[in-house]
Image: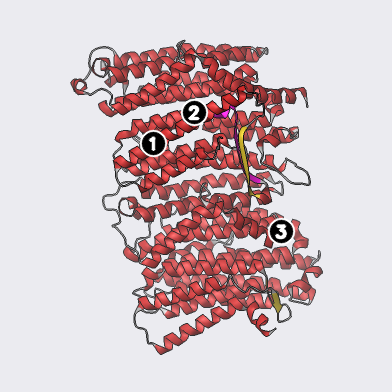
Amino acid sequence: MNIDYLLIMKSELILTAIIFFLLFLKVWDGIKSNATLLHLTNFLLFINLIAGFFFNTDGELFNGMFHTNSTLFLEKSILNFGTFIISMQAFDWLEDHNHLLEFYILLLCTLLGMDFMISSGNFLMFYLGLELSTIPLAALCNYDLHKIKSSESAVKLILSSAFASCILLFGISMLYGTTGTLNFKEMAPLIGSGKLQILAFIFTFTGFAFKLSAVPFHLWTADVYEGAPVPVTAYLSVISKGSIVFIFITVLFQLFHNYDTTWYNMLYLTILLTITIGNLFAIRQDNIKRFLAFSSIAQVGYILLGISSGTPMGASSAIFFLIVYTFSNLGAFGVISLVSAKTGKENISDYKGFYTNNKFASWVMAISLFSLGGIPPTAGFFGKMFLVTAGAAKGNYWLISIAVMNMVISLFYYLRVVKAIFIDENEKPIAKLTGSMSMRIALVICIIGAVSVGFASGLFEYIGTITK
Amino acid sequence: MINLSVLLIIPLVTAIAVMLSRNASQVRWTALWGAIIQLGYSSVMMYEYITQRAAGNTSQMLFESRYSWFSGLNIEYYVGVDGISIAMIMLTAVVVLTGILISWNVTKLTKEFFFLIVLLSLGAYGFFISLDLFTMFFFLEVAVIPKFLLIGIWGSGKKEYSAMKLALMLMGGSALVLIGLLCLYFNTDTGGGAHTFDLLKIAHMHIPIEAQRFIFPLMFVGFGVFTAIFPFHTWAPDGHSSAPTAASMFLAGISMKLGGYGCLRVAAYLMPEAAHQYSWIIILLSTIAIIYGAFATLMQTDLKYINAYSSVSHCGFVLFGIGMLTKTALTGAVMQMVSHGLMTALFFAAIGMIYERTHTRQITQLGGLLKTIPFIITVFVLAGLCSLGLPGLSGFVAEMTVFMGAWQNPDAFYRIATVLACASIVVTAVYILRAVGSSVMGPIKNEAFRNFGDATWNEKLASVTLIICIFAIGIAPFWLFNLVSPDTQLIMDNIARGIAGK
């Protein structure tokens, strides 16, 4: 009986235990070698990932404030997996860093916040989780203290997310005012056609759009991504964004399903702008992190396209796409992380002739980019296909046409990077880089995932059955 | 018993083996053996197919196998072949084999080169055997990126520009196909609101005419981009001429046929009423492509550009045959695909062999080569003669069939178009004879030409293989005709049903 309560909050409890353990390690100060500490943390994160697959118990706690089910466990596993890979890829960067454990304590706090957020059944819990997942992130963005750009990035992140939270809270307070409850389940039937409630919906939607960096609320993204250390950028673009998508799906589908025409129209415009502007701006970038920032904005547009269908198929293809996106984006960020840690170079033009000395890393980068661009046989093709198919079920072929045509534009800028790596000549290409063992393992995992997840139809069908 | 998935497994295993090879020589031999085994298996398949047909097997597709892939969306891995696909598979096998032989001396990044070539062929085989539209689309796109890398890394001239242009235009084409595909998917109904990508099932459904009017142009233009439909042909000359020899052979010989096959099998077969209504536009565009291509070729001085523009013109005949909507014309279109694939592969191979020795492709700088490298030049002249439609070679047979079929369409507009298209053959003769004459005849332009060695064993083998195929089709066209025509008849039946209004 009591053990069930513990198992429902299993993911959160394990994370908390790890955080406290790391705190004790910090105070104890017994392990001097950074490498040992890193291996230990990676091992703990691996345990955390594996534990996510066992003893999963569905249920509710605290009067519905907190709930879990198979979908949420899967989503948490995706987040855990991404964090594990990012931590493996951060090895080369953190190996010589003075503040190691603080990085992980802050990082895991945000992960804990995300877990609470996506499991929440109540706006209070949701908001608590959201703040817990954002505020430490600002500190992480500024982790390389001597870099001015990092400070800029942190300030931009904290200000814009505070602003977004304000808007979101304003929307939530209106909802509370009109329904008298903060519980999702109690609130859902009370949401009708009141003017105030529609306004509340618009504010909530805007808050989410800010967090998702959907156009026109995307302006903070590129600067934040550019300034933050590469692993943090990877974390922001994959884990942070993924968790927001998960809770967004829940809120839209559970709470606002009466408004599906309203939010379809709003999403329609947002998708159109997000995909097009994200793509057009990505073409102009030379800094590879800014480039991936805009490309990830465009990717969010495709995720929203799948969600806009409002069907379980839409939700499942969005979750599937996030798995694919985790593999492919982290593959690309892994290589960038390696190059940045060893040489400090972060421009696309620096990658010219990269293939001469770094064959494996080049292929990882190329396959990840193809996967992001949705080129078969990589998993990205299947991810995009399912999102677009889900979106097309509404029968709005103009939107689909624009989204699909944008895939051609996106191919142009992904190919630009591939061209720099494989085709362009360079007298002084980047020398042979030897990453740490964990980095190499992480890259291999990413590449295997980016190629094979699409063929694993079982995974997609499993997601389909649990989101029904 | 034939299992079609073997056609995918052989290239896949070859590709992996190529990546694991230790040195360049191992890479080459692995790729070559892979191609030989594939050709052997395809031949066995063709033999088995003909035997079964002779024994009275009348099912539309043979050697079918299907596995559920994404059951929630009714996506299946569903393969099967008919005469048209077999002709295309044989063409692919031959062109890939000869392409590998011709690129025997690639020294820059050998392993990657052969890996990409084999990957390209995998896409083509998959496309030709697929009977599920999703799988088909998947394979269509598989072949795009290897082309980009092949042209970008091993190409010549303005290779970056050409590679990017080609990749983007082909992806644009497949984006159109994708939109059409999704629209088609949601217009199918297998009962209970479920949709299907199954090609044969869709063929027997009645897609509403309004939907057909929207989907058909998307599909036809989308696939048409691959086969260089006017005005989306501009990737072809740049792409072909910048690509390395084997990639040119593959691009013109097989990749352009993916488009023609798609237009026929997907667009015209599944949406017969729209095909009928829009056929005048197809004829208009393809006639422009034929004539414009021919005249544009006249202006070229680079051998590769000559063949590239003439490919635009010759692939125009494929769409021309499809647009005519008579059985003979459709058969002619398929024959033209096969014939053009072989002929253009031979032409590019010959140009590649010349370029490797002279390091120039400008007609004005060449001359008198017949005296120094007679074998290569003989191959070159034969390819030219096939291109201009000399009787006894495959080009004549195919174009003749297209024209015969075209004339069966009694409408005045179609007849005028046929006359115009026929007239373009004269222009073809002009540019081919001029190019051949001034580059191989006459006095030796450059003293360095005297030191050239004639074709090596691999070049000879490749050329002879292609020439044998061209002669075989030219002298005994009924083999190909009998293989293909029962299936074009089926497509024609569907179209006739569409025209009749049911």
Residue with the mark numbered 1: B33
Residue nearer the viewer, B430 or A319: A319
Residue A295 x/y as whole percent: 51, 55
Q: Residue at x 37, y 66 (%)?
A: A437
Q: Are marks 3 and 2 on the same chain?
A: no
Q: Quadrant of the C terminus of chain B?
A: top right
Residue B16 x/y as whole percent: 41, 46
Marked residue chain, label 2: B
Q: Amino acid at mark 2?
A: Ser
> Quick one: SS at disc 3?
helix
Residue with the mark numbered 3: A263
Q: Is residue B444 above or below residue B44?
A: above
Describe residue A343's horizontal placement relative to residue A152 as left or right: left
Q: How far is mark 2 from mark 1, CA to CA?
A: 15 Å
Residue B481 x/y as whole percent: 56, 18
What residue range appears in magenta?
B75-91
Q: Are marks 1 and 3 on the same chain?
A: no
Q: Residue at x 39, y 31 (%)?
A: B99
Residue with the mark numbered 2: B43
Q: Are marks 3 and 2 in contact (CB under 8 Å)?
A: no
Residue B466 seen from this side: yes
Q: Is residue B271 above or below residue B382?
A: below
Q: Residues within 10 Å of mark 3 (few under 14, many from 20)?
A: many
Q: Quadrant of the N terminus of chain B?
A: top right
Frontmost of labels 3 and 2 is 2
Which mark sits nearer the N-terminus, 2 or 1?
Answer: 1
